[in-house]
């Protein structure tokens, strides 16, 4: 398949979903957002816990992340919910999302007189946005417009031999078709960075891989912590992974075999096609947010012990490498890569099965997580303290 059915946006990007993103500018607006989303269709709340009492670099970081979420092509329109005294620059937030050509509305809880008035105003404005975009039609889109994020979590020994290689197979295929793949989890490059550097496009990219790994380790050392005490996680160890190096060797397999075109920051998106690294942590909620910030339309998620997380505006497809986990959690897991472990199918066969589902989801089929609305947990990766 060399095309899929998506929503062409005015800025030239292509979405596979048509959501109204209801974006709180600060944690204090979350409850109002949740009420608006509860009372409307097509809306997704971007519930996070940032936006005030942070250092200036982190406030800038959160503002940029919220802008990029609003710019994600799966978002057709945005409603910004401001408290009125937050640290996030809500004027810039509104202006930059509006510059994409998407309809944007904003409400201010303090100006409206409080929570109940803001909820009613938000419902009214969300209704207006829904009617503006609900008639959008899918059109045939070339695969060169496709942007996929990849992730692994709750890993065990099957992840590195089954589900991660399956994602690697799909990642190679997306790149061969002219699309873009983003992978991250800098913490899980440790001990395997020399392998990634061999695939770097040039010396500059190889040097960037070294830089982000060193900076990630130094952030832990700065507070007197050895990162290896937290990675692998207790769950990983119970699943049979012994060291961060062993975990890293399994984790990087999901990136496939293609050339690494560049390294981007947490708030950035790739500037070209092909395979890109995003400097990001390993925890699910911050990593999935980073992929959405990077413009991912769909995310493939490998797991062995069973990680159920989704994301508000980006469908997440679960690839389970452990056949026992798949049987136990088949209402959360989309693809049974455990058949590689049992010898029933090859990595290539499950890879093709995964690619077929990826295309169906891109064309509108719901993932299992979307079907049960396991799409609410998210947050942004910040570097400084809350002050």
Image: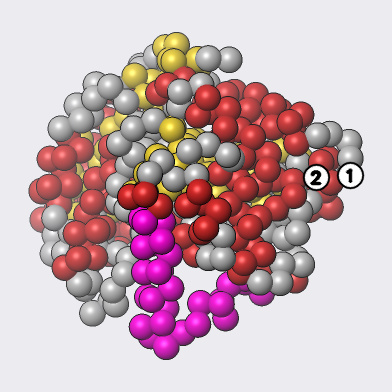
Mark 2 crowd level (few <14, some 14–19, many ≥20, 10 Å Cα): many
Q: In this view, does 52 lie to the left or right of 382?
A: left
**What is the x, y in percent for residue 36?**
34, 46
**What is the x, y in percent for residue 279?**
39, 56
From this view, report whether residue 87 is shown above or below residue 301.
below
The quarter of the displayed image where residue 7 is located: top left
The quarter of the displayed image where residue 123 is located: top left
Q: Residue shown at 47%/52% (left/top)?
A: 197
Badge 1 vs badge 2, beta-carbon distance below 8 Å: yes
Q: Residue shown at 84%/52% (left/top)?
A: 324
Identify the residue position indicated by label 1 in the image.
Answer: 342
Q: Identify the image quadrant of the N terminus.
A: top right
**What is the x, y in percent for residue 236?**
68, 67
| Residue nearer the viewer, 293 or 22 | 293
Q: Give the range drawn in magenta.
A: 207-235
Q: Residue shown at 75%/66% (left/top)?
A: 239
**What is the x, y in percent for residue 4?**
50, 17
Is 338 part of what is drawn in magenta? no
Q: Label 1 to label 2, Cα distance in Å?
A: 6 Å
Identify the residue position indicated by label 2 in the image.
Answer: 338
């Amino acid at each position: 398949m060399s095309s899929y059915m998506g929503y062409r946006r005015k800025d030239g990007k292509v979405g596979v979903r048509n959501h109204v993103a209801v974006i709180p500018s600060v944690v204090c607006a979350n409850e109002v957002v949740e009420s608006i989303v509860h009372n409307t269709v097509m809306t997704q709340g971007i519930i996070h816990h940032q936006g005030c009492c942070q250092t200036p670099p982190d406030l800038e970081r959160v503002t940029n992340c919220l802008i990029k979420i609003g710019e994600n092509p799966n978002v057709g329109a945005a409603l910004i919910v401001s408290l009125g005294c937050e640290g996030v620059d809500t004027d810039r937030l509104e202006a930059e999302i509006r510059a994409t050509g998407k309809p944007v509305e904003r409400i201010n809880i303090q100006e409206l007189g409080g929570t109940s008035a803001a909820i009613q105003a938000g419902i009214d404005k969300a209704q207006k946005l829904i009617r503006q975009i609900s008639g959008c039609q899918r059109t045939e889109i070339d695969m060169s417009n496709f942007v996929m994020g990849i992730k692994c979590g709750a890993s065990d020994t099957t992840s590195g031999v089954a589900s991660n290689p399956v994602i690697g197979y799909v990642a190679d295929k997306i790149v061969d078709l002219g699309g873009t793949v983003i992978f991250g989890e800098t913490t899980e490059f440790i001990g395997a960075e020399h392998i990634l550097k061999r695939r770097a496009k040039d010396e500059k990219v190889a040097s960037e891989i070294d830089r982000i790994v060193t900076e990630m380790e130094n952030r832990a050392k700065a507070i007197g912590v050895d990162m290896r005490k937290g990675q692998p996680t207790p769950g990983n160890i119970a699943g049979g992974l012994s060291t961060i190096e062993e975990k890293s060797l399994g984790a990087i397999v999901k990136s496939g075999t293609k050339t690494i075109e560049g390294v981007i920051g947490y708030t950035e998106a790739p500037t070209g096609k092909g395979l890109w690294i995003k400097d990001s942590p390993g925890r699910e909620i911050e990593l999935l947010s980073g992929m959405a910030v990077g413009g991912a339309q769909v995310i493939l998620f490998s797991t062995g012990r069973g990680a159920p997380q989704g994301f508000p505006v980006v469908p997440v497809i679960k690839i389970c490498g452990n056949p026992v986990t798949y049987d136990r959690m088949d209402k959360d897991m989309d693809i049974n890569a455990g058949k590689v472990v049992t010898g029933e199918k090859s990595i290539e066969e499950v890879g093709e099965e995964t690619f077929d589902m990826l295309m169906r989801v891109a064309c509108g089929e719901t993932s299992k997580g979307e079907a049960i609305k396991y799409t609410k947990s998210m947050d942004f990766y910040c570097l400084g303290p809350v002050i």
